[in-house]
C-alpha cells in the first residue's frame, strides 16, 4: 500500500513532460517547468530545515502560476498550506492567520497591491514573516522530504453555524481521495483543458478544477476572477473541453448569451456544445437553469454535491441520466447515507434525512477545535447538516438544518458572523440576517435591523461601513429597518418569518 507522498500523487507533475500545465494570459508553463518552480519554492521554504513539519504557511494570491507554485511547494516541503481569500477584509485575514497560527506568509507580484500595506502591518504585529515567491524561486534545489500521506496538508476556512469560520484540515490522503474519485467519475483525461476563474480559497476551485487537472496532466487556463468576455472568447475559440462553475455563473452566462445578437450567440453556444462536460455545483442548480442551459448549449449540466469538509460526495453520472434538480448518486469510494432524527439509517427512497458521509475523502479535523470536530461526527460518519431525499436512487437536496447558513453565489456564509459584525455598528440595537431566495445569487444576504432611538441608517451608509469589515460577498444586499424583530415566546428571533417578509 502507498503510505508516503512526496507529491508523486501528482503523477503528471513528476513525469516532467513538455505538456502545457498552466496558461496565464499569454504565458504558458509546461509540467516540467512547473515541477522545477515547485521544487525551488519548496527548497526556499525549507532553507536549512529538512521538513516543514506541518508549519502553517499562508499565501495571498489570486489564481496564477505563483499560486500553484506556492500551494504545491508548501505540500512538497511538508507544510500545511493556508490559502487566503484575496477579497477578504483585514479582520477576516487576521482571524485566519491567528486561528491557523501561521508563521510565514507568501505573496507575489500577483497579490492585490491595494491590500498589501494593511497585510504587511498585520503580519508585523503578529510576528509573521512575509516572503515573496520570486525570492523562493532563486533557491537551489536540494533533497526534499518523504512524507506520510497521513500528514496534514491544507487548511481552508469555512463558515458554520458558529460565529467565526473554522479551519478545516485535510491530509494528503484526504486530498488524494477527493481528486481521484472525480478523475474516475468524470472521465478526466490528459487532453482536457479547463478555465479556472473560481476563487482559490475554496475546494471547488482548488480540488475540482486545479488539482484534478494537474493530477491527470490536463491544461488549466488561469483567470484572476470571472472575466466573462475573455472566458467566452476562449469558449468560442474551442479552447476548453470542460467547464466548471457555480449556478450563479450559469445564470449570468444565460443572461449574457440571451442578450447577444444571434450570430455571436451561436458561436459561443456552439463552443459550449463542443465541450465534453459542463459541471454545476456548490449550490442548488434550479431545474429552470438546467433547462435554459440545455436549450442554449445542448449541454445537460452535471450537478454534483460537496462540502469543504468532504470534497465531493454525490454526483450525477458522466454516462447516464443527469436529472434536473437532483445531485445524483454517491461517488466511487465515498459512503453516503441518509439518517433520520433518531440517528437511524434510512434505507428506502422518498424519506428525507440528513446526509452523512464516510471515506478517505472526509477531512481530519477542525484545527485545534476538538469539540467542534467531535460534535460533527457520529459513529465515524461526518454529519453535513444538509437534508436530502432519495428518489429512485438519486439524491435531491431539500435544504439545510440551520437557517443560519446562507449560500450566496456559491459562498457559504454564517448569518451569525455577519450579525455580530453589524451589531458593532453603533446605531444598531438588534439585527437578524437571513438568506432570501434570489434568482441570481441563490440566496441574497438580507439584514433586518432595529436602530437605537432617534437613529437613521440608509443602505449606502451600511454598505460603506461594511466594506472594510467583511468580504464584499457577505455585505447585505438588502437592508430592512424595523421597529422590532419578530420573536417567539422564548425571545428567539423567528428567522423563517423574516424570510417570508
Ligand atoms: C460577488 N458579489 C457577490 C458575490 N460575488 N454578492 C453576493 N454573493 C456573491 N457570491 C458582489 C460583489 O460584492 C459586487 O457587489 C458585485 O457582486 C459584482 O462583483 P463581481 O466580483 O464583479 O462579481 P462576479 O465576478 O460576477 O462574482 C460572482 C461569482 C463569485 C459568482 C463569480 O461570487 C464567485 O466566484 N463565486 C464562487 C464561490 C465559490 O467558489 N464557492 C465554492 C465554495 S466550496 P457591488 O455591490 O460592489 O457591485 C463549496 C463546496 C462545493 O461550496 O460543493 O463546491
Ligand atoms: P462549503 O461549506 O462552502 O463547502 O459549502 C458546502 C455546502 O454547499 C453544502 O453543505 C451544501 O449546503 C451546499 N451545496 C454544495 N453543492 C450543492 C448542490 N449541488 N446543491 C445544493 N447545495 C449544495
Image (spheres, rainbow, N blue to C red):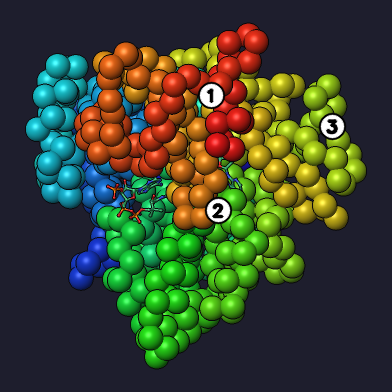
Tag in front: 3 or 1: 1
Q: Secondary structure at mark 3?
A: loop
Using the image as rendered, state which of residue 247 and residue 338 is in the foreground.
247
Residue 21 percent location from the top left of the image: 35, 63
Using the image as rendered, state which of residue 275 and residue 396 is in the foreground.
396
Residue pointed to by mark 1: 161
Residue pointed to by mark 3: 345
Q: Secondary structure at mark 1?
A: loop
Residue at horizontal 41%, vertical 17%? 430
Residue pointed to by mark 2: 281
Q: Secondary structure at mark 2?
A: loop
**Quadrant in which the N terminus appears:** top right
Q: Is residue 430 visible?
A: yes
Residue 145 percent location from the top left of the image: 36, 34
Q: Quadrant of residue 317?
A: bottom right
Mark 3 vs mark 1: which is more N-terminal? 1
Q: Is residue 394 above or below residue 155?
A: below
Q: Is residue 269 above or below residue 481?
A: below
Mark 2 vs mark 1: which is more N-terminal? 1
Using the image as rendered, state which of residue 44 and residue 188 is in the foreground.
188
Quote the CA–CA distance across marks 3 and 1: 24 Å
Residue 328 percent location from the top left of the image: 71, 55
Quote the CA–CA distance across marks 2 and 3: 26 Å
Disc 2 + disc 3, Cβ < 8 Å: no
Disc 3 + disc 1, Cβ < 8 Å: no
Q: Is residue 387 above or below residue 298?
A: above
Q: Is the residue indicated by label 2 positioned so its CB lies within 8 Å of ligand 2?
A: yes
Amino acid at each position: 500500500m502507498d503510505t508516503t507522498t512526496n507529491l508523486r500523487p501528482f503523477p503528471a507533475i513528476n513525469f516532467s513532460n513538455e505538456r502545457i500545465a498552466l496558461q496565464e494570459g499569454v504565458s504558458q508553463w509546461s509540467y516540467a517547468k512547473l515541477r522545477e518552480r515547485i521544487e525551488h519554492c519548496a527548497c526556499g521554504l525549507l532553507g536549512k530545515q529538512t521538513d516543514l513539519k506541518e508549519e502553517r504557511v499562508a499565501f495571498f494570491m489570486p489564481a496564477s502560476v505563483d499560486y500553484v507554485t506556492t500551494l504545491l511547494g508548501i505540500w512538497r516541503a511538508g507544510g500545511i498550506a493556508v490559502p487566503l481569500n484575496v477579497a477578504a477584509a483585514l479582520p477576516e485575514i487576521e482571524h485566519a492567520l491567528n486561528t491557523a497560527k501561521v508563521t510565514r506568509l507568501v505573496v507575489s507580484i500577483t497579490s492585490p497591491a491595494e491590500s498589501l500595506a494593511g497585510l504587511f502591518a498585520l503580519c508585523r504585529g503578529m510576528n509573521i514573516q512575509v516572503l515573496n515567491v520570486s525570492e523562493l524561486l532563486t533557491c537551489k534545489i536540494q533533497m526534499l522530504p518523504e512524507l506520510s500521506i497521513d500528514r496534514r496538508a491544507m487548511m481552508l476556512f469555512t463558515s458554520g453555524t458558529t460565529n467565526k469560520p473554522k479551519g478545516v484540515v485535510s491530509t494528503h490522503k484526504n486530498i488524494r481521495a477527493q481528486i481521484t474519485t472525480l478523475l474516475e467519475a468524470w472521465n478526466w483525461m490528459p487532453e482536457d483543458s479547463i478555465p479556472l476563474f473560481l476563487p482559490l480559497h475554496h475546494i471547488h476551485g482548488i480540488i475540482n478544477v486545479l488539482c484534478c487537472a494537474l493530477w491527470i496532466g490536463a491544461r488549466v487556463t488561469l483567470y484572476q476572477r470571472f472575466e466573462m468576455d475573455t472566458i467566452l472568447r476562449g469558449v468560442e475559440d474551442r479552447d476548453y473541453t470542460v467547464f466548471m462553475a457555480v449556478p450563479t455563473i450559469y445564470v449570468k452566462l444565460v443572461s449574457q448569451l440571451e442578450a447577444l445578437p444571434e450570430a455571436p450567440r451561436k458561436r459561443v453556444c456552439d463552443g459550449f456544445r463542443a465541450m465534453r462536460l459542463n459541471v454545476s455545483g456548490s449550490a442548488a442548480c434550479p431545474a429552470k437553469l438546467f433547462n435554459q442551459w440545455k436549450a442554449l448549449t445542448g449541454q445537460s449540466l452535471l450537478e454534483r454535491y460537496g462540502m469543504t469538509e468532504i470534497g465531493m460526495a454525490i454526483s450525477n453520472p458522466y454516462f447516464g441520466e443527469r436529472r434536473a434538480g437532483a445531485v445524483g448518486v454517491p461517488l466511487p469510494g465515498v459512503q453516503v447515507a441518509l439518517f433520520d432524527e433518531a440517528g437511524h439509517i434510512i434505507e428506502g427512497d422518498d424519506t428525507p434525512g440528513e446526509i452523512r458521509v464516510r471515506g478517505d475523502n472526509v477531512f481530519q479535523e477542525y484545527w485545534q477545535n476538538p469539540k467542534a470536530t467531535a460534535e460533527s461526527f457520529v459513529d465515524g460518519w461526518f454529519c453535513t447538516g444538509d437534508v436530502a431525499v432519495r428518489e429512485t436512487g438519486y439524491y435531491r437536496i431539500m435544504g439545510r438544518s440551520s437557517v443560519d447558513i446562507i449560500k450566496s453565489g456559491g459562498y457559504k456564509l454564517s448569518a451569525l458572523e455577519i450579525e455580530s459584525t453589524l451589531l458593532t455598528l453603533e446605531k444598531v440595537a438588534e439585527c437578524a440576517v437571513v438568506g432570501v431566495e434570489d434568482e441570481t445569487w441563490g440566496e441574497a444576504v438580507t439584514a433586518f435591523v432595529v436602530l437605537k432611538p432617534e437613529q437613521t441608517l440608509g443602505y449606502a451608509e451600511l454598505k460603506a461601513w461594511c466594506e472594510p469589515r467583511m468580504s464584499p460577498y457577505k455585505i447585505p444586499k438588502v437592508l430592512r429597518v424595523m421597529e422590532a424583530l419578530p420573536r417567539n415566546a422564548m425571545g428567539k428571533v423567528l428567522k423563517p418569518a423574516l424570510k417570508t417578509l
